Amino acid sequence: MTDVTRVDKQAARLREARKMRNFATAKDAALRFGWNYNTYSQHERGHSGITRAAKDYARAFKVSEAWLLTGEGSPEDAFAGQSEELREVFTRLADAPPAVQARVLSVAKALLEDYEQSRNTATTPTS
């Protein structure tokens, strides 16, 4: 795939993401999120690639960054409906070194197991 085709497809997905979140125009979205209108408009028209801004656009429009860049998977963000705090933690975790990710996952799994066991104990009837 040529760069022109790739950029055009990214631009089309960016427009689709904006419309999915009910922004009628590129200007509406740029104003709402504080983006430079000229830059955002160029991205939507396919005049330049969105690679550097993709994470911000994906977060704002609540779509998957991978989908926005490549078209793979679903546009729906895996964290849709979650709190911004939870979204931020998972985003930061994804950017962390593998050793930090492993430690956080280990602690999270242990906490969830404790939570699930206490919930199961509380709902299990006694005779």
Image: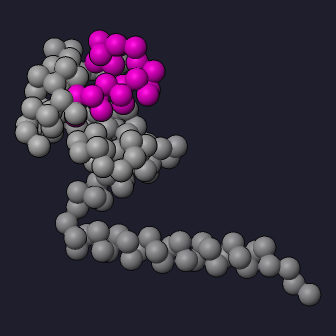
Along the viewing direction, whichever of 54 and 121 lies nearer the viewer:
54
Picture coordinates of residue 107, whole percent (x, y)? 41, 74
Q: Residue at x 40, y 23 (%)?
A: 19
Quick check: can you spot residue 65?
Answer: no
Q: How many marks?
A: 0
Q: Residue furthest right?
A: 127
Q: Residue at x 45, y 21 (%)?
A: 22
| Quarter in which the N terminus is drawn | top left
Q: Residue furthest bottom?
A: 127
Picture coordinates of residue 116, whole percent (x, y)? 62, 74
Along the viewing direction, whichever of 70 and 98 lies nearer the viewer:
70
**As drawn, is 45 to the left or to the right of 16?**
left
- State which quadrant residue 63 falls in: top left
Q: Residue furthest front?
A: 1
- Asked whether 26 falls inside the magenta stretch, the response is yes
- Asked whether 119 falls inside the magenta stretch, the response is no
**As drawn, is 124 to the left or to the right of 93?**
right
Quick check: can you spot residue 3?
Answer: yes
**Colour treatment of the image:** one colour
The majority secondary structure of the magenta stretch comes to helix
Picture coordinates of residue 87, whole percent (x, y)? 40, 48
- State which quadrant residue 96 falls in: bottom left
Which span is picked out in magenta?
10-31
Q: Residue at x 76, y 74 (%)?
A: 122
Q: In the picture shown, does residue 5 fall above or below 126?
A: above
Picture coordinates of residue 30, whole percent (x, y)? 28, 18
Q: Residue at x 47, y 44 (%)?
A: 80
Along the viewing direction, whichever of 92 and 2 lies nearer the viewer:
2
| Quarter in which the C terminus is drawn | bottom right
